[in-house]
Amino acid sequence: MKKTVVIGASDNPGRFSYKAVHQLKRSGHEVVPVGIKKGEVAGLPIETEKPSIDDVDTVTLYVGPQNQPSWYDYILSLRPKRIIFNPGTENFELEKKAQEQNIKTMHACTLVMLSIGNY
């Protein structure tokens, strides 16, 4: 299974990041929700201190491009194998920085990928 860091995690059931954490966990993936507000989602605490995490396969983004610059260094420090830019999070600047570090980038929807079995 793929250790996944969800950036922009929320405890609001109406948010796609909330749904993604639940679906990732149901699918058997190890999930680390990271956000700006403390809370809990799918029984997991939302990390607000940008924790160091080893062996990250995927970072899936739920933060708009206008709010991503403060996350760049953290995301890249995780050294994920890939970054998924969910709809509305596309960001050429971050994508370029990631690709320069040999991190695969994708414009995709984590929820759709999970639902069709190609996560």
Image (cartoon, rainbow, N blue to C red):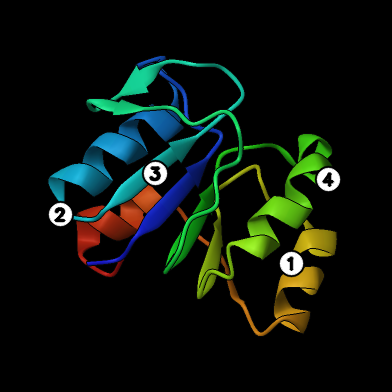
Image coords of residue 1 (percent x, y):
22, 67
Lower position in the chain sequence, tag 1 or tag 4: 4
Q: CA distance from mark 2 to mark 1?
A: 27 Å
**Residue of label 4:** 69
**Residue of label 1:** 95
Is 50 or 58 nearer to us in this picture? 50
Mark number displayed over residue 47: none
Q: Is residue 15 left or right of residue 71?
A: left
Please report the residue visible at 57 percent of the width from the left and 28 percent of the height from the top: 48
User: Is the residue under label 4 in contact with that under label 1 (CB below 8 Å)?
Assistant: no
Image coords of residue 36 (percent x, y):
61, 24
**Residue of label 3:** 32
The amino acid on which the numbered mark 3 sits, given as a three-letter code, is: Val
Number of marks in picture: 4
The amino acid on which the numbered mark 1 sits, given as a three-letter code, is: Glu
Lower position in the chain sequence, tag 2 or tag 4: 2
User: Is the residue under label 3 in contact with that under label 2 (CB below 8 Å)?
Assistant: no
The amino acid on which the numbered mark 4 sits, given as a three-letter code, is: Pro
Q: CA distance from mark 2 to mark 4?
A: 30 Å
